[in-house]
Amino acid sequence: MGWAVGSGGFLGVKLYPPVGFAPLDNARLQPGLPFAAGLDRALVGLYTFCEAAEVPILTHSSASNEYSLGLRRLVEPARWAPALERFPKLRLNFGHFGGDAPGWVDQAVALIDRYPNVYSDLSNSALVYDDAFAARLQATLAALFAAHPRLKKRLMYGSDWWLSALDPAAARAVDRFRSVLGAVLAPDELADVMGRNALRFLGLLDDQNRPRGGAAARRLRAFYGTAPRPAWLAA
């Protein structure tokens, strides 16, 4: 991983707890798992590296795709609280925000409010093809934005590519996101959700939309070297 992030142009790490592990505290949560303690040590090593080097982590955070019955209990956003308490500057993104798992949205927002670099994305959202879900999400987001202003700079568009391409409505996904979210966001706020917030999560922009010179930005600029850079990395 050190080479992939340091030299290979990789931006971050994806973790998938529904395969059977919690973000931390496996020794307590899964006492029958023979390698639970070693797993926790490996995760601490990962978080130590990621926090120090500004390496973002994307975690699957949906009740879907559990590899065995009951493993979704390890996936809920609140399971990340012990890791964030120990590594409060960790750059963490909860994938699949806005689903129907009871309480999970509130858990994610509580951690977004508490920690500076916690985000969530709307990848593979049913808003693309389900009008009733889109209406519920609009109402939920309007209430959340009013109560939790930081969320407007911490929520991100997400495609879940390539899986989202299997949906027959995939071609209209971006337009649908803009339409649904535009009903509860001002144009500049919508621009944040549709792009700039992702650059913040990756460590390339600050909250005032100014380019950052942190570790993540330096790595990516070094990777491009003298080659043409994308517009969002031009500064």
Image: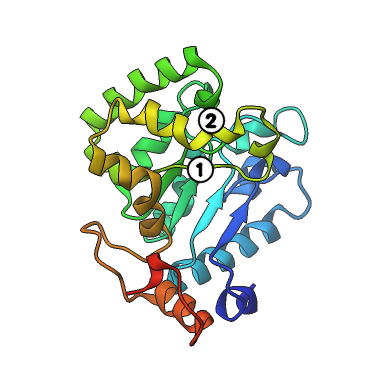
- Looking at the picture, tell me which residue is in the foreground, 31 or 139: 139
User: For the point 76% across and 43% down, which residue is it?
Assistant: 32
Disc 1 designates what residue? 158
Q: How many marks?
A: 2
Which quadrant holds the N terminus?
bottom right
Q: Dot 1, how many residues are within 10 Å of its Cα: few (below 14), some (14-19), or many (20+)?
A: many
User: For the point 21% across and 28% down, which residue is it?
Assistant: 146
Residue extending furthest top?
Answer: 132
Which quadrant holds the C terminus?
bottom left
Residue 88 seen in the figure? no
> Do tag 1 and tag 2 residues touch (Cβ < 8 Å)?
yes
Quadrant of residue 150 within the rendered picture? top left
Q: In the rendered structure, which disc, 1 or 2, sits on the residue that comes first in sequence?
A: 2
Residue extending furthest bottom?
Answer: 226
Q: In the displayed structure, does residue 58 sit left or right of residue 119?
A: right
Residue 20 seen in the figure? yes
Q: In the displayed structure, does residue 30 sit left or right of residue 121?
A: right
Disc 2 designates what residue? 125
Give residue 52's position: percent from left, percent from top. 44, 73
User: For the point 63% across and 45% down, which residue is it?
Assistant: 161
Give residue 162's position: percent from left, percent from top. 67, 45
Q: Label 1 vs label 2: CA separation?
A: 8 Å
- Looking at the picture, tell me which residue is in the foreground, 42 or 138: 138
Amino acid of disc 2: Ser
Report the disc number at residue 203. Answer: none
Label 1: element kind: loop
Q: In the displayed structure, does residue 41 sit left or right of residue 221?
A: right
User: For the point 30% across and 25% down, which residue is it?
Assistant: 183
Amino acid of disc 1: Gly
Give residue 234's position: percent from left, percent from top. 37, 73
Above or below, 146 relative to 209: above
Label 2: element kind: loop
